[in-house]
Amino acid sequence: SSELTQDPAVSVALGQTVRITCQGDSLRSYYASWYQQKPGQAPVLVIYGKNNRPSGIPDRFSGSSSGNTASLTITGAQAEDEADYYCNSRDSSGNLPWVFGGGTKLTVL
Amino acid sequence: QVQLVQSGAEVKKPGASVKVSCKVSGYTLTELSMHWVRQAPGKGLEWMGGFDPEDGETIYAQKFQGRVTMTEDTSTDTAYMELSSLRSEDTAVYYCATLFLGEENYFDYWGQGTLVTVSS
């Protein structure tokens, strides 16, 4: 199937660690990339490939993958990390070349 | 560093067409694979189409086939996305984004977004 599934909402206490997951068949073949989106702003790439961060992204952001699940981990979440997070990958089914997950709203308490 | 600057907000009536532009600076358009992603109010990101380097042509999501056309003017390094037969469900922010082409692919640069409102 050409779908990536994310939990709609996740919360984390300030300074704690949170994992945001993304599930889909395509993740068995392709790495996910992760995007952070704050209200009224364009998405920003935070993780790509096996576990790579673009320049300027704090090292508290990391990525991992196992089977059909990709994960974005924030170690020591900060107030400014409160945002929507989307996963994305190439689609292995061929129905839709690129697919995004439904997004996870992260609340930092 | 790539910069993408999009055209301003649009208000259109149902049945009309809209053409959104995305001006590239820092690189030339021929060096990039440009894609378009939209986001309806309060909803997630939806890939619409873009240049597929494997096929050497622009590919569109099946949902938009026949209604969307993506073009490029390499003389001005400007990409365009035109959506026709607009309906209220097309109200959304439309983003251009560049697809990094390498061992892994990902959308590395994004425009600021263009709000298209479809209303009678």
Image (cartoon, rainbow, N blue to C red):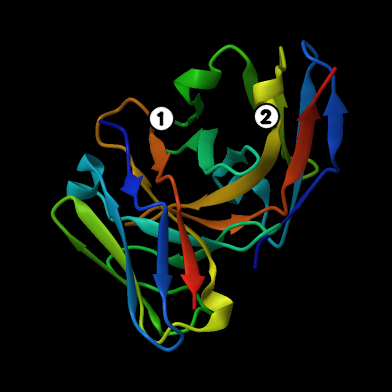
Q: Position of residue B94 (x, y in %)?
A: 68, 40
Q: Position of residue B98 (x, y in %)?
A: 57, 50
Classify 10 Å Cα crowding around label 1: few (below 14), some (14-19), many (20 and above).
Answer: few
Residue A53 visible in rendering: yes
Q: In the image, is A39 to the left or to the right of B12?
A: left
User: What chain does mark 1 sit on?
Assistant: B
The residue at which mark 1 appears reads as B55
Q: Are marks 1 and 2 on the same chain?
A: yes
Q: In the image, is A38 to the left or to the right of A94?
A: right
B47, A6: nearer the viewer: A6
Q: Position of residue A82 (x, y in %)?
A: 54, 71
Q: Quadrant of residue B106?
A: bottom left
The residue at which mark 2 appears reads as B71
Is label 2 in a helix, a strand or a loop? strand
A30, B51: nearer the viewer: A30
Which residue corresponds to the image point at 84% horizontal and 17% vertical from the top-left? B13
- Give the amino acid type for the residue marked by disc 2 in the picture: Thr
Q: Is residue A69 above or below residue B1?
A: above
Q: Quadrant of residue A83?
A: bottom right
Spatial CA span between label 1 and label 2: 16 Å
Quarter of the image where the N terminus of chain A is located:
top left
User: What chain does mark 2 sit on?
Assistant: B
Circle count: 2
Q: In the image, is B19 to the left or to the right of A80?
A: right
Q: Earlier in the sequence, mark 1 or mark 2?
A: 1
- Give the amino acid type for the residue marked by disc 1 in the picture: Asp
Q: Quadrant of residue B117?
A: top right
Q: Position of residue A11 (x, y in %)?
A: 42, 69
Which residue corresponds to the image point at 66% horizontal and 60% vertical from the top-left? A39
Classify 10 Å Cα crowding around label 2: few (below 14), some (14-19), many (20 and above).
Answer: some
Residue farthest front in this picture: A109
Which residue corresponds to the image point at 56% horizontal and 81% vertical from the top-left? A79
